[in-house]
């Protein structure tokens, strides 16, 4: 009985350690080169990761009034423009789902906290 309790405790601790390590920020993440490229353009702005028809896309905009935003595919190719202030935005702008901010500059015009999920620019 004591051996079973020891084994269960060791298994539980190992599992907790594995989960803890795997949830840490990783240096290697999906579409790393694309995000580095987008960061270089939008380091004074915001980048969000979204889904469009099941595919990962990124919407990015500068930290400036009326700057609008652009949507990029996983390879960094621009697939849409979302500038509501200067005309009709592309249809894709209204079709994005599950958007999560992955980068936002500090002291931004939106009054939101800085975000840097993947440690871009470090």
Image: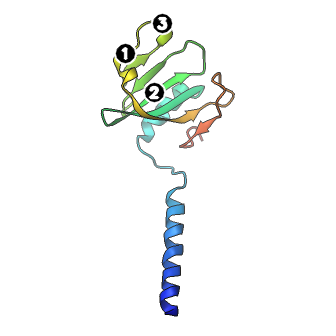
Residue 107 versus residue 19 in the image, above or below: above
Residue that appears at 50% across and 63% down: 19
- Residue 6: x and y in percent read 52, 86
Front-most of residues 88 and 5: 5
Q: Which residue is mark 2?
A: 59
Q: Mark 1 highlights which residue?
A: 90
Q: Nearer the viewer, residue 110 or 25?
A: 110
- Real-space Cα separation, disc 3 to disc 1, in angstroms: 12 Å
Element marked by disc 3? helix
Q: Earlier in the sequence, mark 1 or mark 2?
A: 2
Tell me the distance, in whole angstroms, between the alpha carbons under discs 3 and 2.
Answer: 17 Å
Number of other residues with Cα within 10 Å of mark 3, as a class: few under 14, some 14 to 19, many 20 or more: few
Rendered-image quadrant of the C terminus: top right
* Residue at image location 34% in from the left, 17% down from the top: 91
What's the colour scheme?
rainbow
Q: Which residue is mark 3?
A: 86
Mark number for residue 71? none
Q: Is residue 8 left or right of residue 64?
A: left
Tell whether label 1 touches label 3 (CB within 8 Å). no
């Amino acid at each position: 009985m004591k051996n079973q309790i020891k084994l269960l405790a060791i298994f539980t601790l190992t599992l907790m350690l594995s989960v803890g390590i795997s949830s840490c920020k990783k240096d290697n993440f999906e579409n790393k080169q694309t995000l580095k490229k987008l960061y270089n353009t939008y380091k004074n702005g915001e980048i969000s990761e979204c889904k469009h028809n099941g595919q990962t896309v990124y919407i990015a905009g500068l930290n400036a009034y009326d700057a609008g935003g652009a949507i990029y595919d996983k390879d960094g190719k621009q697939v849409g423009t979302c500038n509501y202030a200067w005309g009709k935005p592309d249809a894709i702008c209204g079709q994005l789902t599950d958007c999560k901010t992955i980068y936002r500059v500090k002291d931004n015009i939106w009054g939101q906290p800085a975000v840097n999920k993947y440690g871009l620019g470090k």
